[in-house]
Structure formats: C-alpha cells, structure tokens
Amino acid sequence: MVTMSLDPVQLMSGQVSELKVASSSNGNSRGLWEEKEEFDREHLGLPAKPKPVTERRTRKVEGGVFFPKPENAVTIAVSSRVLFRTEREQKVFEQKGVEEYLRYQIEHENEPFAPGPAFPFVKALETVNARLRDLYPQSEELFDIVLVTYNHAHVGIRLINTINHHNLFIERFCMTGGSSPIGYLKAWQTNLYLSADADKVREALAEGIAAATMFMSEKITEVSEYQLRVAFDGDAVLFSDESERIFKAHGLDKFFEHERENEDTLLDHGPLKGFLEVLGKLQKKFYAKGQRLDCPIRTYLVTARSAASSGIRALKTLRAWGLEIDEALFLAGAPKGPMLEKIRPHIFFDDQMFHVEGAAEMGTIAAHVPYGIAQNHNPKQNASVGK
C-alpha cells in the first residue's frame, strides 16, 4: 500500500523522478523543427548556430496578448510549495528559524527546485493557453498563473531561476513575507487557489474562493501532454453538502428517499462550481472553432453516488447551470482510485480524505477540498505547514 505523508507535499519515503510533462509553448525548449534545422545546417556545410549565452527565455507572444487583465483571465494562484518540491528548505525553516532559512535560500538560489504536485497541472494550463492564442490572438480569456508564497522577497531570485529553468510562463508573483495571502487572492480575482497549507485553504474557501490542499504520493502516473484533464467529486465540491448531510445523519436509505423526492429541485452550488464554469467557458471557445473533438480541456465527474438511485438530480443540476461535463462516473460507493488511474487527471478534487488517499495510492495527483459536513467526520486533519 502506498502511504501519504501528513505533510501534504512531503513523501514518507523514496524519491520521485521528475514528472514527464509538455514543454512550454512560450519558452525556448527544443522542438523537432530545431533538431531538423541543425541537421540541415550540418549536411549543407553551414556553421552551427551559436548557442545562447544564457538559458533565460525570450518572453514573447507573437501577435497576441502578453498579460491578460485579471478581470478577463482565469486566474490560478499556486503556492510555491505545491508547484515545487521544497521539503529540505522547509526543514531548515522549522529546525533553524527564519534567518538561517533565508541564508540557505540565498546560498542555493542558483539551484532550481524540482517539480511539485501542481507542476503537471500548470504545464497543462500553458498548453491550453498556446492553443487559445493560436485561435484567438487578441483574446485575454487565458489562464493566468500567479505564484503565491509566504516567502521573503530574497527568495524570489531562486523562484525566478527555477521558473526559467523549467520554462514556465509565470510572471506574476505574490511574496507576502509571512503574511496571509488571502486578501491578495481576492485582488487578483482568483478562480482557484492551490496550497499545501490546509488552514489557508479553509480561509480562502470561507472568503468564497475555490481552493484545495494538494498532495503527492510515492507513485506518480504520467499525464497527458496535450490535454488538461480535471476530475471533480460531486457533493461538497461541485454541489453543496445538502445531500451528504442527509446521508451522514440518517443513512443511505433516507438519502435515496431524499434524492427521489427532490429530483426536480436543483442542488445548491459547491465551492468549485465556479472553476468548472470557467473551464466550460474556455471549452466553448474551442467548440466555436470546430474543435470539440480535439479540445485540450476535458472534465470528469467522479462521484460515489449511484446513477439510478441518486444520479438524476446531479445531472439535472449541471444541465440547469448550463454546464457540460465530458464524462460522468457514478460509482455507487466503489473505490475511485482505479477509475482515476484510467482517467489520469492532472488534478482530482474531493472533500473526503478517504477518497483523496485512495486516489494517491493509484498515482493520481489529488487535492482535498475541506468543505462541508464530511470534515466533521474526518479523523485525519492535515497539519498546516509553513511556506
């Protein structure tokens, strides 16, 4: 059995190799055309092209929008501790204090961090952006990634070096020097916040910001380089926890009865409904160009609900909201891990740690949404962790 660390982004044992993800469309990663050009030059007797002095990228988007305005973009705020692997630095902070931590970071600022659990997700967002820029060069409806960290500004140099090393297109930083970032998230009009700090995730949810705590297991499944795949639980994630409250209080039979009686009554929205909405909005931009079958965004509902007994209300709610879900899996209480292993999402959101752990055991990057009645029945509350 694969175990998960109580530290949301720290492994209990073993090493994780660098995740296989797509190269950024905005960087200077080598492509097939570059290799062909070098081959042609060699066989034509031409001198080789000089290598650049630095690996730093030219940040240029030909004929398109460079920085979308927050009100037009889909803003994803990502903590540095889930985008990158910073366990060693966190130990320095916890064991030796902030001054030694800052000194350590400055001494190692030319050493890039390894990818963390949010890294494949962020790379997939950039892949979608590249496709959107091709179709809509002047549109600001793009994913905009903001790196959020409690770190002091001194650590910014190492973060920038890491971003350049991995060819990430992230220009917006929020370094709070130990202060809460929640107020800044609202100013950025954040659509999703991913963090390793469960307390800050709960604080964001209380402010109406979609948020989740990210986890990493020892086993990591390769994910698509060409299509962003996002999987959602239903109750207390896309929907409110109304039905889950009935189940927790009165059992399964009463839950089925409640769902049948309220089949035509829409469920209230849950904390991540808005994120599914913005994904759907971007999907429709591809559909409008005849690319429904080649859309680089795909969404999944993976719920423990039964289809015949309680699925109709969920589907009617999504239809009334005008939301399309690409695939819906009603598992009737079966484990979610094996299904997620087949889907291979870049991220899976669930409100119950039991399902998050089950997903992680199968190699899925899972994120906990600490919302609703299930939190009162969850004996495993993850400790809040630093940066």
Image (cartoon, grey):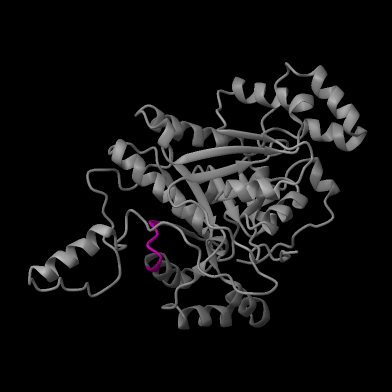
Is 166 on the left-hand or right-hand side of 121?
left
**Which one is in front, 378 or 30?**
30
Q: The N terminus is located in which quarter? A: bottom right
Whether 166 is among the magenta residues is yes
The image quadrant that residue 180 belongs to is bottom right
Relative height, residue 232 to residue 45 (above, below): above
Which stretch did the figure color magenta?
A: 165-171
**Which one is in front, 192 or 26?**
26
Whether 102 is among the magenta residues is no
Residue lying at 42% horizontally and 31% vertically, measured from the top left: 292
Relative height, residue 51 to residue 194 (above, below): below
Residue 302, image x, y percentages: 67, 39
| Residue 275 appears anywhere in the view | no
Residue lying at 70% horizontally and 55% vertically, measured from the top left: 199
Residue 282, image x, y percentages: 44, 35
Is 215 on the left-hand or right-hand side of 6?
left
Q: The C terminus is located in which quarter? A: bottom right
The image quadrant that residue 381 belongs to is bottom right
Residue 21, image x, y percentages: 45, 58
